[in-house]
Image: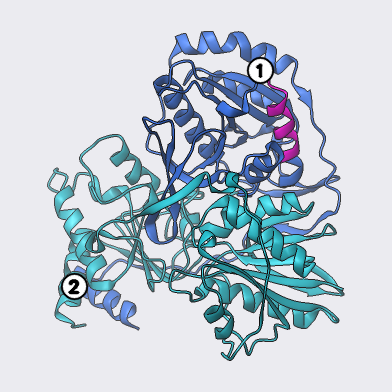
Amino acid sequence: MSTAYQIVVCGSIVPDPLQTLEPVAAPTGPALKNEMMLPAVLDPWAGHALYEAANLAKNQPGSKVWLVSLGPKAKLQQVMMTVAQKVPFELVALDGSASGFTDATETAAALADAIAAIPGLDKSRLLVFGGWESASRGAGATLQMVGERLGIVDQFQGVDQLTVNADGSLEILERIEGGKHQVSKCAGASALLGWATGNLPEPKNNPQVGMVNMRTVMPALQKAKPVKFAGDGLNFTSVALPKQLRETQIVKEKSPDDIAKEIVEWIKK
Amino acid sequence: METILVLAHTENDGSLAKSAREALHAAAALHKSLAGSKLLVGFVGENIQAAANSIAASPVTKYFGVSGADFTQSRYATDAAAAEAICKAAQATIVVAPATSRWARVLPGVAQRLGGRADTHVTGVAAAGGKISVSRWFYRQRMEGALTRTQRPWFIGIDPGSQTPCECGSGTAAVENVAVQLSDGCKRTTVTGIRAPAADAQTIRPDAQLLFVTGAGWTKKQTDGQAHVPEAGKLILDFLKHARASLGSSKSLVDLGGEGQAVLPFLSHLNQVGQTGATPRHAKGLSTCCHGEEPHTVGWRFIGERRAVNLDPNCGWARGKADVLYVADAFKVMAKVNELLANGKT
């Protein structure tokens, strides 16, 4: 039995992880120094979710992928130039802050409203994907709230594998403690999956896919709904870089035997 | 006046995990510093009485429980229903829970149901002047922030390993049973099992004293111009066996495996530490053949004592990050370390 899924991936942008990040105090709360100047990328976990969604859609004829992305419009446009070349999707853009200091509840409300407004949404075929973490807030909370707002109570986090069984049920592997996976069987859509890394490599850029995607990406960006976060009730009392810098003892002259002896003594101490 | 509720789920054997005791310790400290507050505990599991009894001598004034076969499984729908019912019964304003995979999956959703807020990965909870603040890391352990909230209930997920577990004495606890009506819709998902590597292939050990971090240098060409991947794999596995260490890996090394290259076959993304991986907590850490600056080094942000072996004296993993850097060939050093550990000599 093949189901044509409607797969909605929630994924935002984050500063390139290789950039140096420094917090600053802004009138609205903490922010990153030169935040709008920092190069951005699609959040790594959201990326895994998107690639898994595309792979599922490819294997389930009739399925379609949407990427619901919340971020400053100009930044989204930059990032989409690359992401759009990876896999086929339709963008739903929201123009607002992608800061790591925004509140998960407010973000979830904006995302859930955007998903609910997708024309022709059929909850009996709906799979909501996203990253279980992010490289910004790493809230690990937003997706669950999105799911609750959409009335989805079959939720999974830290997902590394999704298999659609012949009877339409879903087998899902979630990360649990100690390097293990919990295996669950879900009757079918609707369901929400927060992905860990999955098993798929990042797809190579495909200019043809990019050209098809960009036909919908640019209009989606142009009509991106503005989103303002009030941050009511939330007050940051401090945000700072960790200060501790260790005095590293450099040992250059010792033989491997002496070093090994020292390491073993240290381990056993 | 705050009502602090600790939510805990029982383990398969009915006991309480260390992470639950850590959450209780944090909540008890909060309770002590908030005049007039109440401290309650709610349990979810198949059988909860033994868990309640194990902390009966704690300052908790009331125990709630949702139990039965439907609550054995770590499943969103039933866990959310149970947690929601307990929070309502307790009229909790602050909910403290260990951020285990089971609670992390469900508690933000419960906060949503109850019109509250949720903060996860919390590493510290404090109260001053009647105001509660929590500290957590942002941008993947790159910066630390402290925040307060006015909304209630406020769900606080405590990162396991970040607190001291409570040493509560045992006794007999009176648990108030909270009834939960489950619809068929709550049982669409069934947990069918746990998939774990074979015992001798398990390289992730959260309770280990030592984290052993391996970098991509293990797979590079060595001084003879050849790569020695099988030898590297044996050295690493032998060390894990002798030292009972947990294995972490840099992203670059894990990704090589995902790209189908002949690398260390026992590594998976589960081993990955750093910006896009885990930030485990261990007393000691030993990194070998790792390179790179921030953000890669955040992988051992929460490691106590740190040492590194690397041929590069300016290795970003070590300078300013480790206590000791040995500038040496890790193949030679680890071979000797394994020999000493195997013989029980130093």
Please determine whether, in this image, residue B6 is positioned above or below residue A220. Answer: below
Q: Mark 2 belongs to which subunit? A: A
Residue tagged 2: A257
Q: Secondary structure at mark 2?
A: helix
| Colouring scheme, one of rainbow, by chain, secondary structure, one colour | by chain
Picture coordinates of residue A73, whole percent (x, y): 71, 24
Q: Is residue B256 visible?
A: yes
Query: Looking at the rendering, which quadrant does residue A35 occupy?
Result: top right
Q: From what the image shows, is residue A45 above or below residue B267?
A: above
Quarter of the figure with the N terminus of chain A: top left
Q: Report if residue A113 lies within the magenta region.
A: yes
The cyan-tinted chain is B
At a point 83% along the width and 57% down the height, the residue shown is B151
Q: Position of residue A237 (x, y in %)?
A: 79, 60
Which numbered disc covers residue A120? 1
Instruction: Locate residue A142 relative to residue B277 in the image: left or right.
Output: right
The colour assigned to chain A within the rendered structure = blue
Q: Which residues are magenta?
A: A108-119
